[in-house]
């Protein structure tokens, strides 16, 4: 059985993330989506909220399981016995970031490997920061985040302004 691991901050999950998860789930038997923390980021949504949103969005895919972890990526990779990590690539700068991250992770665990999927052109300029910027100023985020979480994300972003 091949299993892949798709980690990210998902603060919040975007349509771009959903597209990567959908495509990754087609090339393996089991896809784990791991909602994690990046120590350089301040989050708008708690880890539990991000896990809950990812579950709402991905429940239609029977071979996807969502989990949350505040630990190291290589630890869940080893514990779950995954064949590789999956990441979406939007640009050259994403590629450089992924190359650095995979090098660091391979130093921690030599069996670590990564599959990089190019993002769909029409989704390649979306990021969680752009969603938050647009939403905070009352803009329409429905083309950027999956339908299931539009209201929830809007509520949080608009409250943040008061
Ligand atoms: N569509 C839309 N946006 C995308 C995307 C896609 N397909 N792929 C990436 N992005 C965006 C995200 O929205 C995010 O935008 P933001 O910076 O505006 O928030 C950005 O690209 C990168 O985010 P993400 O892919 O979630 O990565 P990250 O850098 O926030 O976190 C972790 C990466 C969580 C996997 C990493 O920090 C980690 O492994 N943490 C655990 C601790 C650890 O092991 N650290 C050692 C790592 S060497």
Image: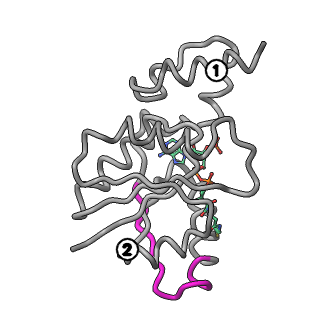
Q: Residue at x 42, y 55 (%)?
A: 33
Residue 157's image quarter? top right
How crowded pointer 1 is (Cα within 10 Å; few <14, some 14-19, many 20+) is rated as: some
Q: Position of residue 110 (x, y in %)?
A: 52, 88
> Of the numbered discs in the image, which one, if any, rests on residue 134?
1
> Of the numbered discs in the image, which one, if any, rests on residue 82?
2
Which is nearer the N-term, disc 2 or disc 1?
Answer: 2
Q: As drawn, is 85 to the left or to the right of 63?
A: right
SS class, disc 2: loop
Q: Are marks 2 and 1 in contact (CB under 8 Å)?
A: no
Q: Is residue 136 above or below residue 29?
A: above
Q: Tell me how the rendering is colored.
A: one colour
Q: Residue at x 40, y 67 (%)?
A: 115
Q: Residue at x 44, y 41 (%)?
A: 54
Q: In the rendered view of the protein, which quadrant contains the C terminus?
A: top right
* Magenta highlight on residue 9: no
Residue 2's image quarter? bottom left
Closest to the observer, 71 or 99: 71
SS class, disc 1: helix
What's the distance in space between the residues labelled 2 and 1, CA to CA?
36 Å
Q: In the rendered view of the protein, which quadrant contains the N terminus?
A: bottom left
Q: As drawn, is 143 to the left or to the right of 104?
A: left
Q: As drawn, is 24 to the left or to the right of 89?
A: left
Q: Is residue 113 above or below residue 5?
A: below
- Asked if ligand 1 lies within 8 A of label 2, the reply is no
Q: Position of residue 71 (x, y in %)?
A: 62, 66
Closest to the observer, 14 or 79: 79
Q: Which residues are magenta?
A: 105-117
């Amino acid at each position: 059985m091949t299993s892949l691991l798709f980690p990210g901050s998902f603060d919040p999950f975007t349509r771009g993330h959903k597209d990567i998860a959908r495509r990754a789930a087609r090339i393996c038997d089991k896809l784990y989506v791991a909602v994690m923390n990046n120590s350089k980021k301040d989050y708008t949504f708690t880890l539990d909220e991000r896990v809950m949103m990812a579950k709402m969005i991905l429940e239609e895919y029977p071979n996807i399981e969502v989990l949350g972890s505040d630990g190291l990526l290589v630890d869940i990779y080893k514990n779950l016995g995954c064949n590789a990590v999956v990441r979406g690539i939007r640009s050259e700068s994403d590629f450089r970031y992924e190359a650095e991250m995979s090098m660091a992770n391979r130093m921690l665990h030599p069996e670590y490997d990564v599959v990089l999927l190019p993002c769909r052109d029409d989704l390649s300029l979306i990021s969680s920061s752009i969603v938050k910027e647009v939403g905070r100023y009352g803009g329409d985020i429905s083309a950027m985040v999956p339908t299931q979480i539009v209201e929830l994300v809007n509520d949080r972003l608009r409250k943040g302004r008061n």
